[in-house]
Image: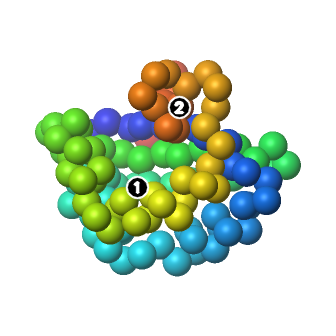
Amino acid sequence: MQRMGMVIGLEPDKVADYKALHAAVWPEILALLSACNITNYSIFLKEPENLLFGYWEYVGDDFEVDMSKMAADPTNQAWWAVCMPCQKPLAIRKEGEWWAMMAEVFHLD
């Protein structure tokens, strides 16, 4: 199992929209996350800075294959089309990242 964290900004005028989307995540998206070996997934919001912190645990054997499967899914592409306009990627993210991935520096079970 691999714990993963990521951060992104949230457009100030989209906070309510983003909260509403995630209060009723499409069932197909929840099923896809599970099918792609993502568990224990949470997104936290820090206001008034409007920073989103995402955390999940990856329990699969090939993260790249699972993420490719997720990216290719038409329903997921539709989900991203409504979520991504709400998000404000950080300038410090690495090339190719939308959410900036974070390194784990501490964990306690």
Quick one: which residue is furthest to the right in this view?
Answer: 48
Alpha carbon distance from label 1 to label 2: 19 Å
What secondary structure is marked by label 1?
A: strand
Residue at 73% in and 51% down:
11
Residue at 36% in and 45% down:
57
Kindly identify which residue carries mark 1: 40
Horizontal and vertical percent for residue 102? 51, 28
- Asked if one can make out residue 34 in the rendered structure from this viewpoint, the answer is no
Q: Image quadrant of residue 96?
A: top left
- Mark 1 crowd level (few <14, some 14–19, many ≥20, 10 Å Cα): few
Kind of residue indicated by mark 2: Ala
Horizontal and vertical percent for residue 32? 27, 63
Kind of residue indicated by mark 1: Asn
Question: How many marks can you see?
Answer: 2
Residue at 20% in and 51% down:
69
Q: Nearer the viewer, residue 95 or 99?
A: 95
Quadrant containing the N terminus is top left
What secondary structure is marked by label 2?
A: strand
- Asked if one can make out residue 100 in the rendered structure from this viewpoint, the answer is yes
Residue at 62% in and 49% down:
87
- Mark 2 crowd level (few <14, some 14–19, many ≥20, 10 Å Cα): many
Q: In the rendered image of this protein, does residue 22 appear above or below residue 77?
A: below
Horizontal and vertical percent for residue 49? 81, 43
Kindly identify which residue carries mark 2: 100
Quadrant containing the C terminus is top left
Q: Is 19 positioned to the left or the right of 71 in the image?
A: right
Give the colour scheme shown. Answer: rainbow
Of labels 1 and 2, earlier in sequence is 1
Horizontal and vertical percent for residue 104? 48, 26
Disc 1, disc 2: CB below 8 Å?
no
Q: Is 104 positioned to the left or the right of 69 in the image?
A: right
